Image: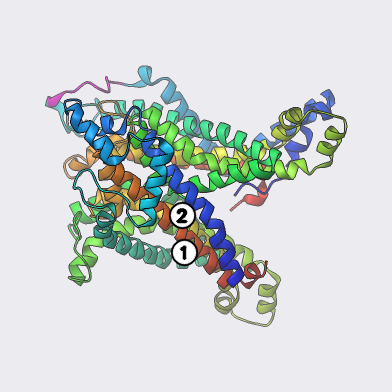
Amino acid sequence: MARLILHRIAATIPVLLLVTAGVFTLIHLTPGDPIDAMMAESVDDSVKQRLRQDLGLDRPLYLQYASWMGRLLQGDLGRSIRNQEPVIENVARRIKPSLQLAGLAMAISLLVATPIGILSAARRNSAVDRLGTSFALFGICMPNFLIALLLIFVFGVTLRWLPISGYVDPWEEPWDGVRSLALPAITLGLALAAVITRTLRSSMLEALSEDYVRTARAKGLSDGAVVRRHALRNALIPVVTVLGLQLGTLVGGAVITEYVFALPGVGRLVVDAVFARDYPLVQGVVLLIAAGFIVSNLAVDLLYGWIDPRIRHR
Amino acid sequence: MAGSTPGSGIASVSAPTLAGAAAARPLRERRWRTLRRAARARLAPFGAAVMLLAIAVALLAPVLSPHDPLKQNLNRALARPDWTHPMGTDNVGRDVLSRVIWGTRVSLVAGFGSVAIAVLSGGLLGLLAGYAGGRVDGLVMRVMDAVLSFPPLVLALALGAVLGAGLTGVVIALGVVYTPTFARLMRGQVLAITAREYVDAARALGVPGWRIAWSHVLPNATAPIVVQASLSVAFAILAEASLSFLGLGVQPPAASWGSMINAGRGYLQQAPWIVFGPGATLFVTVVGLNFVGDAIRDALDPRLRV
């Protein structure tokens, strides 16, 4: 296991380096000068020149990258142009709602997808299966923002059961907090549930056709016991992989969901920074999201090795 | 996902220089057989009908559109759907149906355009990496890994921000986002195909490397690329709608489904049709394209059937 961990970490380092180079290049892809893009034409040239010097944009590109990396290694991701606060502080302030949203969405997706996926596979080609596969198709083809607006229309506007925007911290006010996160988490959770349902159904079908399942049935075990004790355990392995692969979709979905429900999370921060042309903030947040994404994928990889011993010894 | 098809049936007969003219007939027959197999998939006819309808609507938008999509009529603002305006009107009295029809163009251009960019760039990079091997392979694939390290929508958003709002920026951004998938797929195919005996035979005959890649490797690697491309178009359309919803796509007053839905969300209580007209169209189009993609996948490689 230690070898697997070291191997995976070593493979991550060059990718992380390339990601930093990519994010650094991003700001220089702006047509013209980033300062011109960020500031109005009417702003005095001397002000623009001073800002260029402050940001080091008047130096050769490789020097800019070297000093940017130097600062990065000290934990300095730059400062937002809008509020002059360090990027890391901007993100720290917004990370809590995003993590709560992602955690709740993942819990909802597993709660919804597990019974549907299992039932679909166990009752293949039945009405239950058709319902399950239709649900999966619906979730995969429906964009997050449309699910969000449907939920707002039904539960917010028509029934008035749940708030349609704003955020209350569930640690401070549990009831109002969960209510404020309910619709965003269902939005994000349903899309994820669709993918998990599909994967679980197909991996369950595969597991149910294995010899050991036939043997278990021949021994006289009930259908429920065969599914629970034999098929499900093996069918869950691909689900972990898919959960890892879906992290990117989850982050992307969070950007949209936070935007629609006006949640003050990291996703909303990216959108606001893009529209304010706050390039240092865009650069810093995108880098942090990518790094978080790489580390999460690494964790999923290691988890996979822990669940399935065959991976460890390969 | 579609990468595990080293040299499918089509592939093994489509190397023109080796198989010669005699192979042309079986190749045509096999293509027809594949097409017939795809058409037999349960929901494929519905998917194909939706796709053809969307293409026809996009091409004939000026003829089919009952009203000018940009013309405002404040006296008819937020009008309910009726015979004059089958999908109602928006907050400034523009006909929602006409805007949905014109929005089809934007969605299809974004969907097919970005996937075409990804197929071309990813295909070439994968071919280069797989065929050259060694350091070139390592470098290309690490760069692709780095691109894959970004959550797709966040990368598209960041690229869209630097390329500027508008359809071109979105198409390029999505093209970049989807490139690594095709590069990986193509590389896998190339590695499998270059290990085949007919490539060894071509090498032994002294055929130049570029010609082997062009005449033998590339035609044999197309099946999984076609499968992936057909499945990617639907997701690219969804991604374009998401970016337009956030305000990065086609700029107002031009119509796109995502931006129409975003503009309508403020009127969800008074005029839900502004959101649900383009929303339903987007959903049906994506479902249809998914059915087509699934049918092509099942026909070309039944092992990948979910």
Q: Is residue B102 left or right of residue A9?
A: left
Query: Compared with residue B189, is residue A218 higher up or lower down, i.e. above or below?
Result: below
Q: Main secondary structure of the magenta part?
A: loop
Residue at 70% over, 77% down: A215
Q: Are marks 1 and 2 in contact (CB under 8 Å)?
A: yes
- Label 1 packing within 10 angstroms: few (<14), some (14-19), many (20+): many
The part of the chain drawn in magenta is B66-74
Q: Would residue B106 be visible to someone looking at this image?
A: yes
Query: Compared with residue B15, is residue B228 higher up or lower down, i.e. above or below?
Result: below
* SS state under label 2: helix
- Label 2 packing within 10 angstroms: few (<14), some (14-19), many (20+): many
Pointer 2 chain: A
Magenta stretch encompasses residue B96: no
Residue at 27% over, 20% down: B67
Residue A44 in the image, given as x and y percentages of width and height: 17, 28
* N-term mark: 1 or 2: 1
Residue A210 falls in image quadrant? bottom right
Q: Would residue A126 be visible to someone looking at this image?
A: no
Residue B113 in the image, given as x and y percentages of width and height: 48, 29
Foreground pick, B185 / B140: B140
Question: Are marks 1 and 2 in one subunit?
Answer: yes
**Where is mark 2, residue-wise?**
A136
Give the residue type at disc 1. Answer: Ile
Residue B186 falls in image quadrant? top right
Q: Which mark is residue A116?
A: 1
Q: Which residue is farthest top?
A: B63
Q: Is residue B213 left or right of residue B111?
A: right
C-alpha span from label 1 to label 2: 9 Å
* SS state under label 1: helix
Residue at 35% over, 61% down: A102
Pointer 1 chain: A
